[in-house]
Amino acid sequence: MVKKSWLPITVIFAIILIWELAARVLQVPDWILPAPTVILAEAIAGWSNYQHHIFATIKLTIYGFLSGVIIGLLIAMTLHLVPRLREALYPLLIMSQNIPIIVLAPLLVIWFGFGITPKLLIIILVCFFPIAVATIDGLKQTSPELIHYMKMAGATNKQIFTKLELPHALPAIFSGLKISATYSVMGAVISEWLGANQGIGVYMTLASSSFRTDRVFVAILFIMILCLLFFMLIIGLEKILIKWRKDENG
């Protein structure tokens, strides 16, 4: 595992080194493309200026992600347990993702104002779909032989769902959670562009309008870090909750 991780780390360091050398040799102005060392220096020196923005984004991301997870799971379970409802609503579920969030965001502001509600709705909209689709697919992939065996043993539909289908779908659910975890940070930043007074999205907008490209890259850096941390958190939970999968793989 450690050996495998060296390859992407090496590639990342190579890209940073090439970027640094190109910026220095070609003397690219910082307001166009700052060198990585310039970005790092601003990240360290300006911590007191943007730390509250980071914490605000983390808080908003967590609230939106948890809400999206709950809604996505409830939708998936409902559609799975009621096949007729799944046939009627599943196409609408797919169509809901064809609407660009950037287009929908101003409408949410008109309908719900500039409070936290439209921001949470944006995060929920980008989070619930991967979870719902992954959960539906995971529940459908349960072995028919096992379902038949449990019915022969006298199990109720509730017992089949809780004891067989739901545990069997956990790997698929966590796949959806990994995608949604990264989407949630993106959704939070987009929602902050609507008119928030703090957050990484606000910090990025102010930096861009003042041609502080180094600060824009600092914001991008922390967005990437937050996405990675959320992703790793989901992986950690997956390893804890799905120990049987590891045993099956040897």
Image: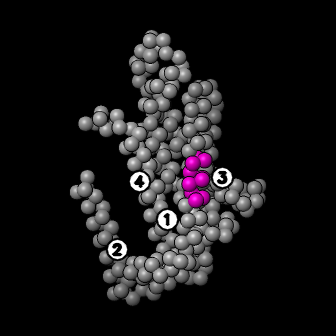
Q: Residue at x 44, y 49 (%)?
A: 234
Give the alpha-carbon distance from disc 3 to disc 2, as whole Å. 36 Å
Spatial CA distance of label 2 from label 1 is 17 Å
Of the two numbered discs 2 and 1 on the same chain, state the one appearing first in sequence: 2
55 on left or right of 164: right
Furthest residue toward left: 3
Mark nearer the N terminus (2 vs 4): 2
Judging by the rendered image, the residue that carries numbered circle 3 is 121
Give the image location of residue 32, x and y in percent: 48, 82
In front of the other: label 2 or label 4? 4
Q: What segment is highlighted magenta in the picture?
A: 59-68
**Badge 2: how crowded within 10 Å, few (<14), some, or many (20+)?**
some
Does residue 235 sit above or below 109 in this rendering? above
Helix, strand or loop for disc 3: helix
Residue visible at 50% across and 76% down? 47
Q: Which residue is mark 2?
A: 16
Which three-letter amino acid code belongs to the residue tagged 1?
Answer: Ile
* Amino acid type, label 2: Ile
Left or right of 136 on screen, residue 116: right
For the residue marked with disc 4, what is the amino acid? Answer: Met
The residue lying at 65 percent from left, 58 percent from top is: 119
Q: Position of residue 29 (x, y in %)?
A: 45, 87
Q: Quadrant of the C terminus?
A: top left
* Alpha carbon separation for disc pair 1 and 3: 20 Å
| Residue 13: quadrant of the picture | bottom left
Real-space CA distance between mark 4 and mark 3, rounded to the nearest whole angstrom? 24 Å
Question: Looking at the rendered structure, which numbered label has been put on residue 143?
Answer: none
Residue 223 numbered mark, or none: 1
Binning the other alpha carbons within 10 Å of mark 4 as few (below 14), some (14 to 19) or many (20 upward) gives some
Q: Which residue is mark 4?
A: 232
> Looking at the image, is 21 positioned above or below residue 124?
below
* SS category of the residue bearing label 2: helix
